[in-house]
Image (cartoon, helix red, strand yellow):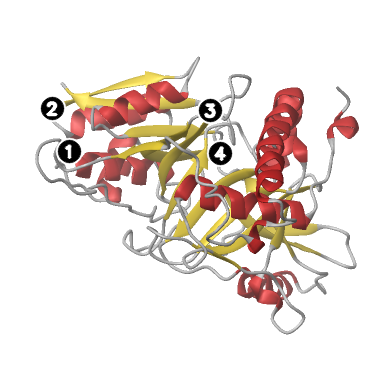
Amino acid sequence: MPPEAAFRTVSVDRARDHVLFTLARTFDANEDQLEVVDATAEDPSLGPYAVYDVDGPLLFYLFPANIPGESGESWVRAAADQIVGPAVLAVDTPRTPWFPAASLERASALAQEMFAEPPGPPHLVCYSYPLIGVRVPFKDSGGSVIFDAVSFELVPTESELHEDQFGARSFLRTVLIPQAEERLAIWAQDDAILAQRLSQLAVASLTARTAAQPDPTAPGVRSRILQNSTLCRSHDCFALYSQTRQVFCAVASAQMILDFYRYPFTQARIAREMGVSSSGMTLTSNAAQKTAYESLSNKGLAATILDRALTWEMARDEINENRPVKSGVEGHARVCAGWLEEPPASAAQRPRRWLRLYDPQPSDPDPCVGGTTTWEKWTTVTHTNFIFVRHA
């Protein structure tokens, strides 16, 4: 399929309906708890914000939302083009509030200060999924720079990268276009489910729902997150730590998992064990991660690398055994500590499946300040590897 044939823009209004429907159906938000706000002429900082691929096309919208069960304001990623696949990609809840309007303004000022060129209008880019940055174009030279939207570190361009380095990568070119046919089908299924529900509610938008109308929550939604015990009363017990340096995503993920098993180490110590330079931009190999898990636990833990034929069920089964999973995507590492599954509405449909991810981005020198908890649709991104860490 030629790339241009795959682009099918999703309107902001349709994306908003998908956001409202998903939060109500999947996460059991009701009219009083659910809030999705839009930009107004008086306050454009409310969003939604457009996020573009580093190659240029529009990828998704960011809708701010307040939903139950999350501590703080969340950002819902909704597809702006059908080729993205899931109509709602993820629900992100940063530990420290993030303000896109402020990031756009600061990045523009930094670009002018650092490069002494008049900047053009900045815009948000997904520079290596799920990471978001601000691209600032230059009016005179026609070039541009990308800053991470929270840390404001300069992001190396794709032409400057080696395979194992941190930097900008096109999500559209490397993931979406090669999977265009499958992803268009995923969006079509999500949209068909929404259209069916809108027809049942007999309203133009879910914002008109009243208590007398049918509850859109999917029956039989099942979920599980890591617990401190499997007997008697238990509670959520997985701690989020942010990466203290831009290349420490695997290091911070290991810190979270080791801490869960009661092996507390600083990221500096873990980085040394993994052979990660504190000043360089090189990412961490899976083999080095495996070695670090086992050596730092004095062989009390065994790590297994899986890097082919990964399935949602693999992650689910580990969580059911109360074990966290390191999940790798291209250029980034996170920890999976929960799952959620919505049953299909009909035999012809696939169940909608999500992972609960503890993302060490955005980075912060204090690991207790940055980071993001995310509910992400399984079909959003290609998981390149899992690392299972178990008692030896």
Q: Are marks 2 and 1 in contact (CB under 8 Å)?
A: yes
Q: Earlier in the sequence, mark 2 or mark 3?
A: 2
User: For residue 300, which numbered disc appears in the image?
Assistant: 2
Q: Nearer the viewer, mark 4 or mark 1?
A: 1
Work out which residue is located at the far bottom of the displayed protein and give it: 42
| Three-letter code for the amino acid on which mark 2 is drawn | Gly
User: Is 354 left or right of 153, judged from the image as shown?
Assistant: left
Q: Earlier in the sequence, mark 2 or mark 4?
A: 4
Image coords of residue 351 (percent x, y): 53, 28
| Residue found at x 86% / y 22% | 1
Q: Secondary structure at mark 3?
A: loop
Q: Earlier in the sequence, mark 4 or mark 3?
A: 4
User: For residue 165, which numbered disc appears in the image?
Assistant: 4
The C terminus is located in which quarter?
top left
Between residue 70 and residue 144, name the one nearer to us. Answer: 70
Label 4: how many Cα within 10 Å (few below 14, some 14–19, many 20+): some
Position of residue 126 relative to residue 159, above or below, is below
Q: CA distance from mark 4 to mark 3?
A: 35 Å
User: For residue 189, which numbered disc appears in the image?
Assistant: none
Q: Which residue is mark 1?
A: 261
Q: CA distance from mark 2 to mark 3?
A: 37 Å
Q: Are marks 3 and 1 in contact (CB under 8 Å)?
A: no
Q: Nearer the viewer, mark 2 or mark 3?
A: 3
Position of residue 295 relative to residue 371, above or below, is above
Q: Which residue is mark 3?
A: 351
Image coords of residue 104 (percent x, y): 68, 70
